[in-house]
Image (spheres, rainbow, N blue to C red):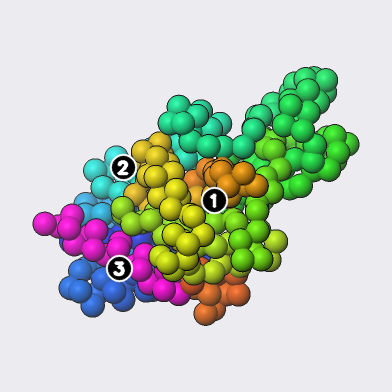
């Protein structure tokens, strides 16, 4: 049997550079990586099934909706593989209803939210949506945070028009959160949690671009509460590597406006205008490989 220190599976071309960076850095520090993609998927499954290869750690960057890769995490779990982001925790994090309940139990600050069952009578759905007030935001109730498309709803008719078109999907309605301006920019933040390190980034919800924040900026702008909030999110979701979105409101209080994304955006800004700052992606790569090395010890 050939044992690899880190297996990595991915199914999105946007991840190509990130995976290449992980692979190169692993080789640089003397680790043995294995890349599992569409081109070698079935051959890899055969080798794993026959006991020819094994992984000490595995990072799954594939979507549960992908018909090819959807069964991979459970298959590897049955083979006794240890994961970065255990599949059970990743699956729970994709269920926004479960995460909502978990966040409440941990006392996390979240917007007013209701989950919509499309089989309910129109009157019941109207009452739920009016509870969070219109305008509001509709989001899919399942899937990773990065896959969620927030849709602004300005009237009940807008809401029912959308729900009528998407009868096979489940949604939740969330109150519209308006961030304050800090230095003439919205106080909206994407926060990366990477094996104990918490890295907040300014994120613009309209142009969808990231901006680095220095430690001095974070304290000067009064953003230090992001750390204890993110630590509580870690306790709730039990993921090793994730991102979340946190907003500062008019009263200078924070709200977690999206739950967690177990496959955080790792596109580099140098290649994608709306990608993550290169320094943060490089830091995530270093942290992942450091974690793998610690696991070997």
> Who's the residue at 56% across and 43% down the image?
253
Residue closest to the eye, 221 or 43? 221
* Position in image of residue 127 (x %, y %): 78, 23
Q: Whole-Å distance between the Cαs marked 3 and 1?
A: 23 Å
* Position in image of residue 146 (x %, y %): 56, 53
> Who's the residue at 24% across and 58% down the image?
291
* Position in image of residue 72 (x %, y %): 40, 48
Q: Is residue 64 visible?
A: no
Q: Quadrant of the N terminus?
A: bottom left
Q: Whole-Å distance between the Cαs marked 1 and 2?
A: 29 Å
Residue closest to the eye, 42 or 137? 137
> Who's the residue at 35% across and 61% down the image?
8
> Who's the residue at 38% across and 56% down the image?
198
Is 296 included in the stretch rendered in magenta? yes
In this view, the residue farthest toward the bottom is 270
Q: Quadrant of the C terminus?
A: bottom left
Q: Secondary structure at mark 3?
A: helix
Left or right: 79 as drawn, with respect to 260: left
Task: For the residues labelled 1 and 2, say whether their Cβ atoms are less than 8 Å apart.
Answer: no
Q: Which residue is labeled 2 in the image? A: 77
| Nearest-to-viewer mark from 2 and 3 | 3
Mark drawn on residue 245: 1
Q: Which residue is labeled 3 in the image? A: 286
Mark drawn on residue 175: none
Q: Which residues are magenta?
A: 278-297
């Amino acid at each position: 049997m050939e044992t690899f220190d880190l297996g990595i599976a991915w199914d999105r071309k946007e991840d190509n550079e990130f995976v290449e960076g992980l692979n190169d850095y692993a080789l640089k520090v003397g680790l043995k990586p294995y890349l599992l993609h569409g081109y070698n998927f079935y051959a890899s499954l055969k080798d794993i099934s026959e006991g020819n290869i094994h992984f000490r750690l595995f990072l799954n960057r594939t979507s549960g909706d992908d018909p090819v890769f959807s069964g991979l995490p459970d298959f590897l779990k049955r083979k006794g593989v240890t994961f970065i982001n255990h599949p059970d925790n990743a699956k729970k994090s994709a269920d926004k209803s479960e995460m909502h309940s978990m966040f409440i139990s941990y006392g996390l600050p979240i917007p007013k939210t209701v989950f919509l069952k499309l089989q309910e009578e129109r009157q019941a759905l109207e009452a739920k949506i009016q509870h969070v007030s219109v305008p509001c935001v509709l989001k899919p109730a399942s899937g990773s945070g990065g896959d969620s498309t927030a849709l602004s709803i300005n009237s009940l008719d807008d809401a029912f028009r959308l729900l009528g078109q998407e009868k096979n999907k489940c949604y939740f309605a969330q109150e519209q959160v308006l961030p304050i301006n800090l230095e003439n920019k919205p106080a909206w933040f994407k926060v990366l949690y990477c094996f104990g390190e918490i890295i907040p980034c300014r994120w613009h919800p309209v142009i969808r671009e990231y901006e680095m924040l220095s430690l001095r900026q974070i304290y000067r702008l009064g953003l230090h509460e992001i750390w204890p909030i993110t630590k509580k999110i870690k306790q709730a979701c039990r993921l090793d590597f994730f991102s979340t979105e946190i907003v500062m409101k008019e009263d200078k209080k924070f709200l977690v406006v999206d739950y967690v994304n177990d496959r955080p955006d790792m596109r580099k800004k140098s290649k994608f205008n709306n990608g993550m700052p290169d320094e943060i992606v490089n830091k995530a790569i270093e942290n992942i490989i450091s974690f793998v090395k610690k696991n070997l010890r």
